[in-house]
Amino acid sequence: MIGLIGIIALITILALSMLITRLATIALTSTGLSEDAARFQARSAFTGTGFTTREAETVVDHPVRRNIIMILMVIRSAGLISIILSLILSFMGSAPDETLYRRLIILAGSILALLFLSRLSVVNTAVNFLIKHGLRRWADIDLRDYAGLLKLSDGYTVMQMHLNREDWMVDKHLNDCQLRKEGVNILGILRSDGKYVGVPKGGTKMFEGDRLILYGRAGDLKELDRRRKGGLGDVEHEQAVSEQKNRMVQQDKQEKEYEEKRKQ
């Protein structure tokens, strides 16, 4: 009986841990982080893994994100989970009415069932709705679906690019780069001194150490991130412009077809 109680306690702790990280993921996503980056940062903070990534730097520089991560770290450092797990281990070794194999099977089956439930779309939708409703009601966080607002699907995404010395755009003005012709938009620039340039103008110059917030097709943004100074970089720019022109032709065709359908 004691072993069964220990298993129930363990599953309860696992469920609470998943719920806490889910809540933190949604809160971080509401501040503008992508869902993948938010999930990674929440799990890293809660488990104490301590990975260092570019997204981690954006979390530290953002006051709301920093507070969310600090709460996760406090919960982790409280040591409640470690204490309960220690008690569970002692219970499992003192149950005369259950065999070790039976308890392991029950424990493994319970964990698998929990993982299965966590992956069900119906469960995820319900949990996300409840968490967002609670955050809107009891927390001072501006929840917005940035992915929905920016239509982050069909290959489109938002990416942060760190400019290094040999990058193609370093020491150039936005007008010189003609990124709009490639289908790429710069939403903002974070300077190396921490200042932010929102909706930069054509005369804005980019420097080594800047971080660009870009919006466009994922493949185009990755290619732009790999592009280096020199003649080869200029050739790659011209190729990207040509590809975007072809896309615009197809897009104009689709828009005309849509207009015809609307008229009918």
Image (cartoon, grey):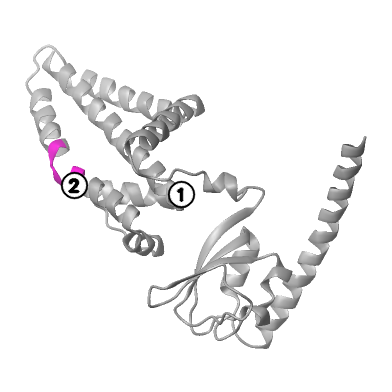
Q: Secondary structure at mark 2?
A: helix
Q: Quadrant of residue 90?
A: top left
Badge 1: few (under 14), some or many (20 or more) residues near its Cα, within 10 Å? few
Q: Quadrant of the N terminus?
A: top left
Q: Position of residue 242 (x, y in %)?
A: 79, 70
Query: How far apart are labels 1 and 2 at the CA level?
Result: 23 Å
Picture layout, residue 27 above or below residue 211: above
Which residue: 33% across, 33% down? 19
Quarter occupied by residue 169: bottom right
Depicted 28 relative to depicted 92: above or below: below
Give percent across and percent down for residue 146: 53, 48
- In the picture, the quarter occupied by the C terminus is top right
Residue position for label 2: 74
Say whether disc 1 or disc 2 marks the residue closer to the N-terminus. 1
Residue drawn where x is 81% and y is 66% of the image: 245
Circle on res. 36: 1
Q: Secondary structure at mark 1?
A: helix
Residue 92 in the image: above or below residue 225: above
For the record, the magenta segment spans 74-80
Q: Report the residue at 38% width, 77% height from top.
A: 193
Q: Nearer the viewer, residue 70 or 219?
A: 70
Q: Residue at point 67% right, 72% down?
A: 179
Q: Which mark is residue 106?
A: none
Residue 175 locus on image (x, y percent)? 67, 79
Residue nearest the observer in this picture, 198 or 181: 198
52 horizontally vs 13: left or right: right
